[in-house]
Amino acid sequence: MEEERDIELDPEAQQLFEQFGGLQAHQKFGSPTGMEDLAHSLLAEQKRHDAVRILMIQATYLLSRYLVNEDFSADHQQEGKVFEQLSAVLGKMGRLPGHLGCMLIRYRGTPPQSDIPDKFDYEVVFGHHVVDGAIAPNVARRNSPKWSKLPDQLLEASTLLADYGVNNIFIRLSDRLAGDLPDYRLCLKILSGFRQSRQTGQPIGVDDNGQRLMVPIINDENLYPDPNLTLMAGLNRLSAKSMERLVDKVDQWMRQQVASAKVRRYTGVYNAALELPKVRAQVKSPPVELNNIKWLLGESESQIVSPEKLRIAQLALELAGASPQKVAKMIKSVYADDFAKINTFLLGERLHLSSDLLHAAGQANKEPQLTQELLGNLQVRLDQVKDHVIDDIHVVEDTGTERSAGKTPPREAVDSRIYRMVSFYKGRSATRKKMVGMVHHPIQFTDQDYQILAKDFRIAREEAEALVVKLKGCFSIEGRFKKSAFAEAVPLFRQYEQKIFQFLWHHMKDVVVPQDRSAFLNALQGLTTQMNQPKRALKILLEDLSSDPATVQFSDNKAIMLANLIVHSDKSLTDYDITPEDIVLSRHKIDTLMAEYAAWRIEKDHEAFSTKIQTIHKKLMEALQLGETSGQRIPAAMLLNLERELYIFLSLVGGDTSTAILRSAAFEYGDPRSEIFGHKESPNCMGPLLQNLRVALRGVGSLGTMEDVPLIESIKTQEETFGRLKNDRQHRAQVRHITEWVDEAVKLIKFRS
């Protein structure tokens, strides 16, 4: 084997990490005025996240070295260098807040970029942070040229993981990592030699601090070589006989659990053993785990998984245990959360795999609940698939002929129950097209259309017909939107809020004539305020906002306004055409659960959300120069209002990202020398520009810290310069309030401190 090249990664990570000071660092401003514009500050915020993403990529790359180098199990000089770097990286990660005690590398198989084969599509999860093949190039571009190798390193690591047969690697982390480093190193050395020893049946020879340790390959209850049981044996110096007795005892105990109809299930002997108090008291848990199916079902040790879900995972193992990646794909065919984004090819593959699972569940005659679990979860996910994907999917009913002959059914063959499910959604797509089309043309609905709509909305056929009539009545013969008719229909619509809001937002907002667009979106406010379960609507709005972060739509403004309406408990806001900025000051009226959910979504989708904010600001600059954007022809006034609504939303939901954006916005709008005030159309928009300064300052007052006080107080010194931006009495009167706005923000900060 050729000499492994040296890996110079960690010093660079240290430099970047120190430069941005981790996620909790206060923003440093380097421009001459002590302030940075929003675009530069957003870039800095992304770079602070990048500092963690780089560590995640490094950790993945370094871990992959152990899987490709079998001789790392011995006393190999290069292994020492790799582990030194890896331990430094994991040590930094373990000291960061919010990581849930682990880092997870797992196979996804749904690459966001077509040039990455699905075989090599892995994602790395660390708390709210996620890194994959799409994000890594962005990280490289945002930082210095020396980071240009990051995408290649992640792809190389993913290739090695795929070659080894990895569907997940789980690494426990803590801020007290140093004392456990010998255990980490021993486990990684065992994994280094596991694949070769599994093939030969010989123990793994491991160098452990100069001593030769022979680690036996341990089989699970199904007689498959199990990497995690092998890790347990090596870490605890247990012999093959001792482990064999342990596996048998735990297996028997698990069978007794099933026989006694107890609800607790486990994904295998390894996980069950570590949950038994007597076993847990005598053995150490491996800090690194490989292909533990438990981590395909959840992301943290505190997450509770249902017995049915565990049993489905066991079925996947029984069907595809020899192919770890196929195990992951089978589980995702029922439980993945990306059905709204998948294409026709991937949907076809998942339907085929879920059919295999359904067939296997049917063989378990004593467990009919598995069939219900499979079909129920698949239906929930098929409900999210885009109509055009459903239209293009081709499936045939599996007659069972191939299975009876011992053959694999063709890819398009699916279980009869899944076939009927897909047929329904194809019919629903056709019915939806009629509902959209009836806005502008006379459409004849059939009894089948009403039956499909009734099933989709879970209502009677007569109610479905009444719903169509009511929706049609909201538009004139000429296709113009009738706001009064919609207001009258709201009591009916709210009865079906889980379905109707999604339909109206995704399918109707883009078909109303341009003159009625604002009226239609405003009408949705009335529906939103009467919802009993607003979280689904908030999820739809935030996902839609970030679905295409490189573009700005007319509906984005209303999406954020509706989100403000959902997060704030004062539903009288529905009477306003814009969100009153005073609600930023009344935090006791915030719906805490909705605000926490929104903050979680922002952190989870940080890359897309930050890119969206940058896009909006970039388009605003363009519109201030040209009068409107070049593509969608969105006027500057609308984009200014969109930023205003965003600042109110961020002020309500809070969080690190929200605080950083608001702080930066206050400093850019608070500097009269900023580019935003120097464009051709800026004088005509001076009122809204200063209004955004006031909203941003209130946001900083609501979320900021005492460190912000000197910086925002410096804005008061700019009043005279602000006054010279426009020779207008009304403008000068507005400028005189800047000191008042700053003092208000400072007072809020000091009150909370």
Image (spheres, rainbow, N blue to C red):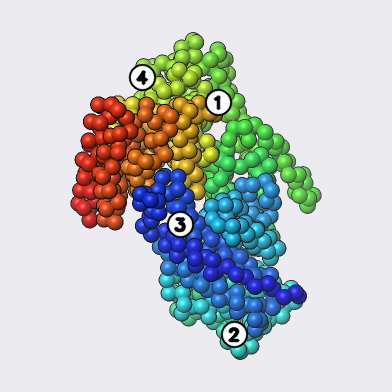
Asked if the residues shown at circle 4 and circle 2 are in contact, with their CB atoms under 8 angstroms apart, the answer is no
- How far is disc 2 from disc 1 in space, using C-alphas? 65 Å
The numbered mark at residue 323 is: none
User: Which is nearer the N-term, disc 3 or disc 4?
Assistant: 3
Say which element carries label 1: helix
The numbered mark at residue 208 is: 2
At 55% from the left and 80% from the top, the residue drawn is 235
From the image, tell me which residue sits under label 4: 488
Residue 504 percent coordinates (x, y): 47, 27
Asked if the residues shown at circle 2 and circle 3 are in contact, with their CB atoms under 8 angstroms apart, the answer is no
The numbered mark at residue 48 is: 3
Say which element carries label 4: helix
Residue 256 percent coordinates (x, y): 53, 67
Depth order, front residue of 129/628: 628
User: Which is nearer the N-term, disc 2 or disc 1?
Assistant: 2
Residue density around tag 2, few if under 14, some if 14–19, many if 20 or more, within 10 Å: some
- Type of the residue with mark 3: Arg
Foreground disc of the pair 2, 1: 2
Residue 360 percent coordinates (x, y): 65, 53
User: Which is nearer the N-term, disc 3 or disc 1?
Assistant: 3
